[in-house]
Image (cartoon, rainbow, N blue to C red):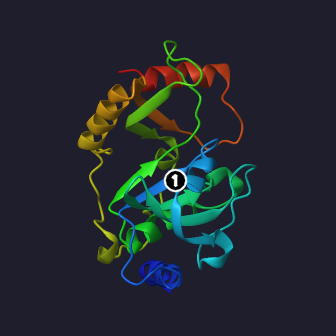
């Protein structure tokens, strides 16, 4: 079965639990400490990952492992309550498959969240940072979810990554944060494999790479 067919099959399985004609506009991936946000959704359906063909189980503590679909602050959302991680032993095709399924359900915007260490000495624990660019070290090492046979139904063979994150959404987020008197920063996200933390030498190198 092709990737496109697997996405279609998974989306159809989820859609059978949704009201007729209902679809999400926004996909949200909740990282560590943010799983409770899914409980704020006025849900029309809640589906455990193991009930969705092609989804794998989240094994990290605090990651519930279910897809919650419904309304949040007036928006139709599909919320991943629990992320999937490369260091759990899954390949990147498995890790990113839920994103493709959310797109197959209709979501045109993706919001990703996580808890990460900060390399900028001006950052403090608990700061909120908007990702405005990233460095994908796994991709440099030959691990990329787009590797494999190309299917034009899934997008471009060579998708541009500049910008990787929507400037309008970043500006909107900053505007809303200012209205709510919440400080947000911008920065570069660096993806490493884990699950171990970095050595001092690695941290020195990463600080140089992530600096503007």
Residue at coordinates 44% horizontally, 82% vertically from top-left? Answer: 8
- Choose between 147 and 192: the one closer to the eye: 192
Q: Residue furthest top?
A: 122
Residue 153, by quadrant, is bottom left
Asked if 21 appears above or below 182 in the picture, the reply is: below
Asked if 25 appears above or below 8 in the picture, the reply is: above
Q: Position of residue 81 (x, y in %)?
A: 60, 57
> Where does the C terminus fall, quadrant-wise?
top left
Residue at coordinates 33% horizontally, 28% vertically from top-left? Answer: 179
- Choose between 69 and 185: the one closer to the eye: 69
Q: Judge from the rendering whether residue 20 lies leftward or rightward of residue 84; answer left or right.
A: left
Asked if 137 appears above or below 126 in the picture, the reply is: below
Q: Residues within 10 Å of mark 1 (few under 14, many from 20)?
A: many
- Choose between 156 and 179: the one closer to the eye: 179
Q: Residue furthest left?
A: 168
Residue 173, by quadrant, is top left
Q: Which residue is mark 1?
A: 29
- Choose between 115 and 70: the one closer to the eye: 70
């Amino acid at each position: 079965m092709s990737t496109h067919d697997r996405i279609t099959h998974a989306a159809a399985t989820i859609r059978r639990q949704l009201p007729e004609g209902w679809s999400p506009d926004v996909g949200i991936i909740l990282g560590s400490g943010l799983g409770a946000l899914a409980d704020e959704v006025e849900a029309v359906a809640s589906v455990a990952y193991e009930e969705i063909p092609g989804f794998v189980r989240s094994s990290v503590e605090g990651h519930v492992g279910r897809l919650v679909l419904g309304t949040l602050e007036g928006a139709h959302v599909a919320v991943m309550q629990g992320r999937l991680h490369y260091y759990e032993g899954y390949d990147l095709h498995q890790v990113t498959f839920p994103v493709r399924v959310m797109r197959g359900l209709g979501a045109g915007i993706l919001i990703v969240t996580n808890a990460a260490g900060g390399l900028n000495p001006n950052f403090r624990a608990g700061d909120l940072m908007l990702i405005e660019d990233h460095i994908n070290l796994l991709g440099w090492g030959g691990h990329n979810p787009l590797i494999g046979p190309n299917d034009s139904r899934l997008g471009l063979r060579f998708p541009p990554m500049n910008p990787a994150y929507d400037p309008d959404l970043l500006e909107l987020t900053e505007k809303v944060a200012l209205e709510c008197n919440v400080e947000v920063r911008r920065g570069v996200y660096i993806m490493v494999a884990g699950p171990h933390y970095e050595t001092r030498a690695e941290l020195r190198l990463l600080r140089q790479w992530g600096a503007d």
